[in-house]
């Protein structure tokens, strides 16, 4: 009876350790996979990590107050064209080198969300917001303006 309890306790500890490892490591895994896909020019794999509808809606919502109704009407089609799998494929045709050696900072904002910010970037502006999608993550928002 004692042996079964020890085994159950060890299994629970292992499960807790695996869950903690996934929680801490999965954002970095997602970013590594996205970077590898981008470097290989694999737009299909990279697109699998992007929720295009959510990114489009977020960009339009952020631009609407800045441009008013007329500007928002013009910005809508531009956002639709720029935030698409086709635009992603075109962007990867000629890969660009990153400027400088600034690193990335992962900021946890909850169990189901994290942000990526370039080291030294102003807070909130230009953050990439990832939200949980099943057991993985998808890019759901690009913060154009600060909170």
Image (cartoon, rainbow, N blue to C red):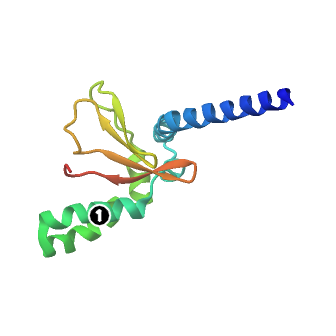
> Is 9 above or below relative to 53?
above
Q: Residue at x 23, y 52 (%)?
A: 144
Assess disc 1: are there few (<14), some (14-19) or many (≥20) residues with their C-alpha within 10 Å of its C-alpha. Answer: some
Q: Position of residue 70 (x, y in %)?
A: 14, 75
Which residue lies under the disc numbered 1? 79
Residue at x 27%, y 26% (from the top left corner): 100
Q: Quadrant of the N terminus?
A: top right
Pinpoint residue 26: horizontal percent, then vertical percent: 52, 38
The extreme right residue here reads 1
Q: Which element is circle 1 on?
A: helix
Judge by depth and name the residue closer to the eye, 14 or 97: 14
Q: Identify which residue is drawn at 21% across, 40% down.
A: 123
Q: Furthest residue to the front?
A: 1
Toward which corner of the image does residue 52 lie, by quadrant?
A: bottom left
- Tell which of 122 and 52 is nearer to you: 122
- In the rendered image, which quarter is residue 78 located in? bottom left
Q: Residue extending furthest top?
A: 101
Number of numbered callouts drawn: 1
Position of 13 relative to 108 (above/below)? above
Residue 147 drawn above or below residue 57: above
- Is 110 left, or right, of 49 in this rendering? left
- Left or right position of 79 against 18: left
Instruction: Look at 84% across and 32% down and name the residue there.
Output: 4
Q: Position of residue 120 (x, y in %)?
A: 22, 30
**Image-based side of 13 in relation to 53, left or right:** right
Question: Percent x, y for residue 77?
Answer: 28, 70
Front-lying residue, 55 or 43: 55
């Amino acid at each position: 009876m004692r042996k079964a309890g020890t085994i159950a306790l060890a299994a629970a500890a292992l499960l807790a350790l695996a869950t903690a490892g996934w929680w801490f490591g999965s954002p970095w895994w997602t970013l590594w996979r996205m970077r590898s896909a981008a470097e290989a020019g694999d737009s299909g794999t990279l697109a699998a990590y992007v929720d295009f509808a959510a990114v489009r809606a977020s960009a339009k919502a952020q631009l609407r107050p800045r441009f008013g109704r007329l500007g928002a009407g013009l910005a809508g089609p531009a956002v639709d064209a720029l935030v698409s799998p086709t635009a992603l494929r075109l962007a990867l045709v000629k890969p660009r080198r990153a400027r400088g050696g600034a690193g990335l900072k992962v900021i946890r904002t909850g169990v189901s969300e994290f942000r990526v910010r370039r080291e030294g970037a102003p807070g909130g502006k230009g953050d990439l917001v990832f939200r949980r999608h099943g057991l993985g993550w998808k890019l759901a928002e690009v913060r154009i303006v600060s909170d």
